[in-house]
Image: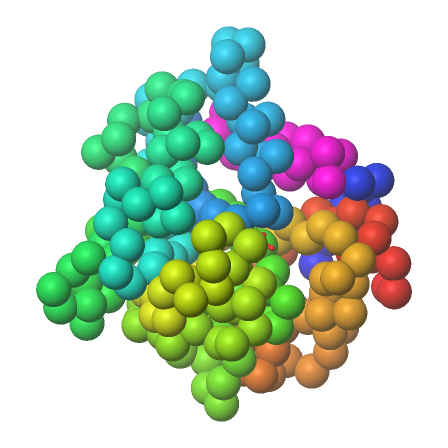
Amino acid sequence: MNIIRARDFEDMSMKAADIVSAQVKRKPDSLLGLATGGSVLGLYANLTKDYENGNLDFSGIKTVNLDEYIGLDGVHDQSYRYYMDNNLFNHVNIKKENTHVPNGMSRDPGIECERYTNLIEKLGGIDLQLLGLGLNGHIGFNEPGIVFIKDTHVVELDESTIKANARFFAEEARVPGKAITMGIKNIMNAKKIVLCVSGKQKAGILKTVLFGDVTPLVPGSILQFHPDFTVVADEEALSVI
Ligand code: F6R
């Protein structure tokens, strides 16, 4: 495990973007596993800048996102498809058909999950997986539980996740209760994993994830077993380590 210390959110976003940029340059047909949420917003802004400055080419890049809310379609402003289009895809030269987000409107979410797991394999596996960390230790929407669920699956979101994500919605009652998420095996099979963590409120859970027992009660703790795992975190997030 490699810990990169950043000063603050901006510095974390730059350092993490540098890792992704290097991957895109090293392997221009990479499959990137992408996350949404506040932690990676600055990173996507930096990638967009790199592209605008002529330093990055996304024309051969393919992407698979970690998760999507069930019941939100791609034009809903809180869907993760919308987030990706507006924070990255619409601003760089990636081919839209090469970008994949689970379909939250699928009539049969079980079949959609199977399709998504197969898709990741068909695309050759993830070269670099970006992650944020939930306050409860979740990665993707793999919530704390008694087992690690391996493949893409439907999940009931934790109370704490709904509360944390309510900040993006008009009111808490509008946060969907269910989502589709890649499973732990899909994430752990990525060749390289980069976890972005910022802020004081994540300090305790980050310490538990990195140095506590490896247990499905703290899903992110499994990352301790990954052979190429980098954490980019700011001073506040690292304040108790
Ligand atoms: C998002 C995702 C989540 C977030 C996590 C942290 O696609 O899979 O695991 O990364 O909830 O969210 P933020 O960055 O908003 O604190």
Residue 115 located left or right of residue 102: left
Instruction: Name the residue at the right extreme.
Output: 240
**Rendered image quadrant of residue 66:** bottom left
The span shown in magenta is 9-27
Spot occupied by residue 178 in the image (x, y as percentages of width and height): 34, 70
What colour scheme was applied to this rendering of the protein? rainbow
Can residue 74 be seen in the rendering of this structure?
yes
Instruction: Name the residue at the bottom extreme.
Output: 146
Of the pair 165 and 66, the residue shown nearer to us:
165
Residue 196 located left or right of residue 216: right
Of the pair 70 and 191, the residue shown nearer to us:
70
Of the pair 239 and 216, the residue shown nearer to us:
239
Q: Is residue 235 magenta?
A: no
Spot occupied by residue 218 in the image (x, y as percentages of width and height): 60, 78
Q: How many marks?
A: 0
Question: Above or below — where is 159 with respect to 146?
Answer: above
- The quarter of the image holding the C terminus is bottom right
Question: Above or below — where is 9 with respect to 137?
Answer: above
Of the pair 134 and 233, the residue shown nearer to us:
134
- The quarter of the image holding the N terminus is bottom right
Q: Is residue 21 magenta?
A: yes
The residue positioned 79% from the left and 40% from the top of the image is 8
| Prevailing SS of the magenta stretch | helix
The residue positioned 31% from the left and 72% from the top of the image is 154
The residue positioned 75% from the left and 53% from the top of the image is 199
Question: Above or below — where is 171 with respect to 59?
Answer: below
Can residue 140 be seen in the rendering of this structure?
no
Instruction: Name the residue at the top extreme.
Output: 54
